[in-house]
Amino acid sequence: ISEALKDGNIVGQSSPSENVLPDFHELVTVLFESKDKTHRNATKLTSSWVPMYEDFSPRGQGATLRLGLMCLLGDLYGGGDDAVEVYVSAICSTILPFKSHRGAALGREFVDLLDECSICLAGCLATSRFARVRIVSSSEKFTLEDISNLAISANSSKARRHLAKTLGLLYEDKKIWGQ
């Protein structure tokens, strides 16, 4: 992605000042929304098959999350809360396995993925009150306690720093706590 952004001629861009990022809602729809698995497997054999986020390598998942954050920040008034919910859910499902790796050695690409997840989660929560409410009131498997534990025990200092920022963003928003 960074190489494509440096290139300056993405998606038929005619001038360097044009916005080259896709619409956030469209990006989430294409890459993150889970499709029917049988439909995906059937179309996998045809030329119209498009890989989904879960199909990507850890490095590809990290780049996709970062692109999603860039699109969210570039399109703050477009889309809707449903796209933010899908994006936050993708981040949480990606970061979820890391809660069981306390102190375990991880490969470089998995540490980078953890970094990207924590950066994107903090960025998303900083810009979206809906995302903060979703994290606090969600019954997902990735809880506030998990964020807290990872902020202390993650293998990466960058991830710890951004997860601590995430906690700060959640605790500072008094309205989501009913006050």
Image (cartoon, rainbow, N blue to C red):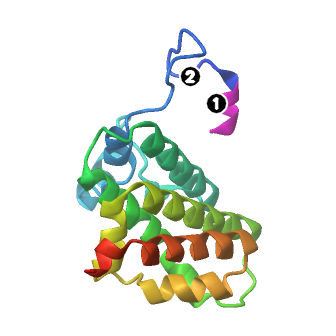
What residue lies at 45% left-to-right and 78% top-to-bottom? 171
Q: Secondary structure at mark 1?
A: helix
User: Is mark 2 in CB contact (under 8 Å) with mark 1?
Assistant: yes
Q: Residues within 10 Å of mark 1 (few under 14, many from 20)?
A: few
Indicate the secondary structure of the residue bearing disc 2: loop
Q: Is residue 95 above or below residue 27?
A: below
Relative to 30, say whether 171 is above or below: below
Residue 177 % position (x, y)? 31, 80
In the rendered structure, which segment of residues is drawn in magenta? 1-6
Magenta stretch: includes residue 164: no
- The extreme front residue here reads 179
Task: Where is residue 68? Give x, y as percent.
Answer: 47, 47
Disc 1 residue type? Leu
In the rendered image, residue 4 lying in the magenta stretch gets the answer: yes
Residue visible at 53% across and 55% down? 56
Q: Nearer the viewer, residue 72 or 87?
A: 72
Determine which of the numbered discs, if any, sits on residue 5 in the image. 1
